[in-house]
Image: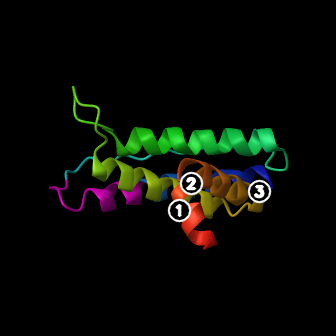
Amino acid sequence: MSRITHSLIGAALAVLVNAVAAYSLAGTPVTSEQHSLTVHYSDLSLARPAGVARLYQRIKVAADSVCGPREITGEHFELPAYRSCFDLAVSNAVEAVASPSLSAYYRAQQAASHPHVATLAQR
């Protein structure tokens, strides 16, 4: 892909993360401040596994930053709103990139972190 295409997709990812954050906060009062992050990856080759893994990590970091806080201070229980926002932001960002290699990597990561879901899907 060209650098321009990477920049446009990066901007689209920022919008998606912003939209997901707004969606996850629908049950709380909306403030005038909205958060979004642009995920740049023009320096990565999505034809290489290392590039795909690095982009996936960048997407996760951006989603974590926008969807936080992850847990209530002093507690070790993840907030449900955080998990919903994070999962949706990552999923939408992966979809927006429209890279078969990134999509396959994402599915593999999901299967590894949720083995019970993969087992049910196989039955």
Between disc 3 and disc 1, whose residue precedes? 3
Which quadrant of the structure image shows residue 110? bottom right
Looking at the figure, which quarter contains the C terminus?
bottom right
- Image coordinates for residue 41, horizontal then vertical, percent: 69, 43
> Is residue 95 found inside the magenta-colored segment of the image?
no
Q: CA distance from mark 1 to mark 2?
A: 5 Å
**Mark 1 lies on residue:** 117
Q: Mark 2 or mark 3, which has the lower sequence index?
A: 3
- Residue 2 visible from this viewpoint: yes
Q: Which residue is mark 3?
A: 101
Rendered residue at 19%/56% (across/down)? 30
Check disc 1 and give the amino acid type. Val
**Membership of 21 in magenta stretch:** yes
Numbered disc in front, either 3 or 1 = 1
Q: CA distance from mark 3 to mark 1?
A: 21 Å
Q: Give the total of numbered labels.
A: 3
Q: Secondary structure at mark 3?
A: helix
Q: Amino acid at mark 2?
A: Pro
Mark 3 nearby-residue class (10 Å; few <14, some 14–19, many ≥20): some
Q: Residue furthest left?
A: 29
Q: Residue furthest bottom?
A: 123
- In percent of width and height, residue 54 lies at 69, 38
Split into 4 quadrants, where in the image is the N terminus?
bottom right
Splitting the image into 4 quarters, where does residue 101 fall?
Answer: bottom right
Nearer to us in this view, 72 or 27: 72
**Spot occupied by residue 40 in the image (x, y as percentages of width and height):** 63, 43
Please indicate whether residue 20 sits to the left or right of residue 91 in the image.
left
Q: Secondary structure at mark 2?
A: helix
The magenta stretch is: 18-30
Q: Which mark is residue 115?
A: 2
At which x and y percent is residue 85?
38, 54
